[in-house]
Amino acid sequence: MRSIFLVCGLLAGIACAMAPVRPTLDSIAVLYVKLALAAGVHDADYVDAYYGPAPWKAQAEAAKQPLAEVRRAVQALRGDLAAIDPAEFDAITQLRHKFLAKQLRALDTRLAIVSGQKFPFDEESRLMFDAVAPEYTAAWFDATLAELDKALPGTGPVAARYQAFRNQFVIPRDKLDAVFGAAIAEARARTLQHIALPANESFRLEYVTNKSWSGYNWFQGNAASLIQINTDLPIFIDRAVDLAAHEGYPGHHVYSTLLEQKLMKGRGWMEFSINPLFGPGSVIAEGSANYGIEVVFPGAERLDFERKVLFPLAGLDPRRVEEYYRVLDVTRRLGFAGNEAARRYLNGEITSAQAAAWLERYSLMEPARARQRVKFIEQYRSYVINYNYGQQLVANFVEAQARGDAAKRWAVFTDLISTPRLPSGLR
């Protein structure tokens, strides 16, 4: 009871309604959002999207509450939440209680990192993302490279041969818009057959440069998104479907739209008016966005669509679709190599140059793309696990219940991305 008043006191520069005598999940959620906005003043990457009351953001920016005060308020609010017994709630509200607890822990951890504290890679990911990715040895990746060596034409270093092979499948710059437009339209049409979205849902597509990422969804609220595609480096044909599904349908755009519609507006749960980048929700967001590629374009259906539509639009030979994806299927087993580069680099075991060299060898990246990825690691740190390990968690969870039934797969997937789920709850 005392600590929620302490939070309001620490947020003196931010409008803080009179706290109830007894903290509730709703009152804690409102203060959590205001504290997350206050944290965003100090950490430009923390708030990925906010679509709650505009005055809350303006007040946070005007107050510029000291970082140490924000963290003390977060810790006090964690105590308030821990004092609430979730046993009195129904199942979905119990999920809400757990979600708030882990989001607050993640915020506390991120504030510690911004303040200069360092954590081992796995401890950081556990505290912020409620997940610890498995470790893989260089020998494991070497075995996959040996298999790839047999699948690629020609002789010489595998990485060079892979790049030479893949460079035959670059989307010409003047055809990007047509290819991405077709991929997004198809992903949207397929998704709407299974997931009901608000009538006003929409997105804008932009092409940008000078970014550390390849694609990004900026959710705007009211079921609208801005999807940006980075054109700094060549874009390969497989990225059209990948980014259309991951950033759009049924990925980030659908995920944020459903949480806004069903939880923020439908239930009045204000914690879903903000998407903090550093929190366990990001594991579900990235994991479901990656797994969603397979949900919306399963197996042969993807190859058929690319053969008939995308390859011709890009001016590529559609007879080479199977050849291209046979090679990519092998390289996907190298997906966790990026985690190992990040783990070793952020733990101080290797330098940035060595991290880039690791990515060149085991993620088969060209030097420029490897350097771009190191910049991503430096900016987003252990966030990198959310893509591959998140996908693994989501895929295993959904497939265990769907058991090969396509309709059931969509139903389980939709429920997952419209409820307050945690990574630890998927294992």
Image: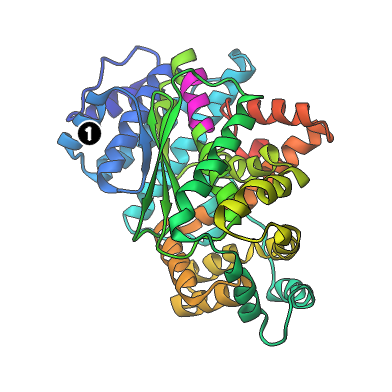
Name which quarter of the figure residue 69 lies in: top left
Quadrant containing the C terminus is: top right
- Using the image as rendered, state which of residue 113 and residue 374 is in the foreground: 374
Give the magenta part as a residue range.
254-263
Please say whether residue 283 is visible from this viewpoint: no
Q: Quadrant of the N terminus?
A: top left
Tell whether 38 sits left or right of 244.
Answer: left
Image label count: 1
- Left/right placement of residue 295 relative to residue 95 reads right
Percent position (x, y) of residue 206? 38, 46
Task: Write the residue at 47% across / 53% down.
Answer: 176
Provide the major secondary structure of the magenta segment. helix
Query: Residue at (83%, 35%) from the top-left corner?
Result: 404
As shown in the figure, which amino acid type bears the numbered disc 1?
Ala
419 over 153 or under it: above or below: above
**Is 102 drawn above or below residue 158 in the view shown?**
above
Q: Is residue 259 magenta?
A: yes
Q: Nearer the viewer, residue 332 or 272?
A: 332
Residue toward you, 369 or 238: 238
Secondary structure beneath label 1: helix
* Residue 168 pos. (x, y %): 60, 69
Q: Which residue is drawn at 43% across and 25% down?
A: 223
Relative placement, left or right, of 51 versus 381 is: left
Q: Which residue is drawn at 41% across and 59% down?
A: 231
| Drawn side of residue 130 relative to residue 374, left or right | right
Q: Name the residue under label 1.
A: 60
